[in-house]
Image: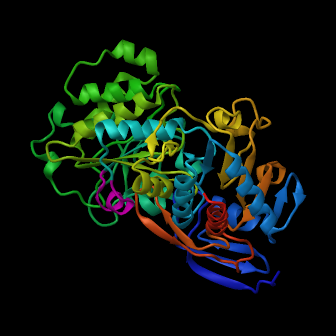
Amino acid sequence: MAQQTDRETADHLCPACGCLCDDLRVVCAGDGAVEVAPECPRAIKWFCEAGRFSVPTYERAGESVSRDEAVRAVVDLIQNSRRPSIVGLVSATIETQKVAATLAERTRSLVLIGEGSSRIFEAELLARQALGKVGATWGEVRRRADLIVYLGRPPDETHPRLVDRYLPPWVGATKTEGGAWCEVGPARWSQIRRGGSGPGATPESVSPEDVPSHREGSAPGARDRQISQNEVPFGARDLQARPNEEIAFLSAAATVVAGKELDADRFEGGTGVPARSIVDLADQLQNARYTAWILGAGFPRGPDTVGAWETLYALVNRLNTDGRRCVVVKAGGPGNASGAEAVFGWRAGFGQAIDFASGDPRYRPGEWSLERLWNGHGTDFVLGIGDPPSAQSFPNGLPKPSVPIVWLRPGCPASEAAAGFAADVQITIATPGWDESGTFVRSDGQPVPVRRIADPELPTAAEMIQELIDGWKERGG
């Protein structure tokens, strides 16, 4: 392996969380990274602390083999399979995802995006198909939003730079003082603050009763006035609903927004949120000129995930009236799930749960999960592309597979799951953002380039999948 020289890259993309920040400066020495700026705990862990496979590895039944032997073994398994499946692809570039789509079409495979259950992904897709989705780019949210409603776990835990990089400047200016938005989740940023006016103004604390409400006698036309960066015309508070109560919470907000009476006792008893709080939130939603619902990790948490998404999208549609603008933007998870949805949506018409068995793509939502495929339900061969599953991917821990498993796993970071994972054939591949370049799609739908920081030593996933396609064609496939 060639020795890496000390080097520094600017404007580098970090795949460690859904922010996909592309402004990092990464300093490398030898074969690893030693400094990342701006500082971010997730970026530091991904670039500086993760172990790496630095040489290509090809394993069959736990023994090292050559690259050609590994490819032949995988082609044999595909050829002998009557119901192949392809899973993963979340951490792959869209260039790899495009080649994987070709393999799925040729081998008539079923495709499941993600290494775990697709329940939440499919639920959002079904709700979007039924009601539509009003989305926006992060740039639009940053420049136009005057109300932010965040649903999910605190972004400090899951998306450390989300507030500073993508949300309006007033959020970062006041959040450290105690909160500047409405957060529905486990955290408690409970202060209500309103920005002052004029240069150098600072936020001042106000009570819920001080928040202007056009339904409680605010001045006519107050919603239509120009909003300056130093004036935040709404209060913000923490609303901590009980787990699995997203539908009740969102339905109550929709009820008040529609001007109907809210059954306060029933609502408070079911969700644990004071009825006055939901009335305040509804007032803010109606007074705001541009509302952005930001969906973080942990939403939805309840069993009726389709219902939660449909309730949210119905509320958003109702708010897009009377000159108001209301949008939904997902914070997203690590990697390139948005890219996979875009690629397969373009190639097959569906972004998830696609079955090519008949020769034409069929949409089969809710029928599969990694656990079912692992146990041989609906497939007799699994090809995984991306990070291997861990025990957390299964309800009862990582089981022994009932069907042959082949996995193309990234060499960086070399997680404990990757180190202890066993498959019939394993091939170590390059990692986007470390030793592979390509393209990702951000959660707001914007493509972003991914550049490698290290000289390539490992084959890319696209190269390996293309070799499988060539081997399949040579055998008449």
Q: Left or right of 261: which side holds 374?
A: right
Give coordinates of residue 146: x percent, y percent. 30, 52
In this view, the residue in front, 472 or 54, is 472
Give coordinates of residue 249: x percent, y percent. 39, 27
Q: How many marks?
A: 0
Residue 399, above or below 421: above
Report the span colored magenta. Answer: 136-146
Q: Is residue 50 visible?
A: no
**Residue placed at 39% from the left, 50% from the top?**
349
Quadrant in the picture for residue 68: bottom right
Residue 334, above or below 213: below
Q: Is residue 226 magenta?
A: no
Q: Is residue 218 visible?
A: yes
Give coordinates of residue 119: x percent, y percent. 53, 35
In this view, the residue in front, 209 or 372, is 372
Q: Quadrant of the C terminus?
A: bottom right
Residue 393, above or below 41: above
Quadrant in the picture for residue 171: bottom left
Q: Main secondary structure of the magenta part?
A: helix
Q: Left or right of 461: which side holds 60?
A: right
Q: Is residue 141 magenta?
A: yes
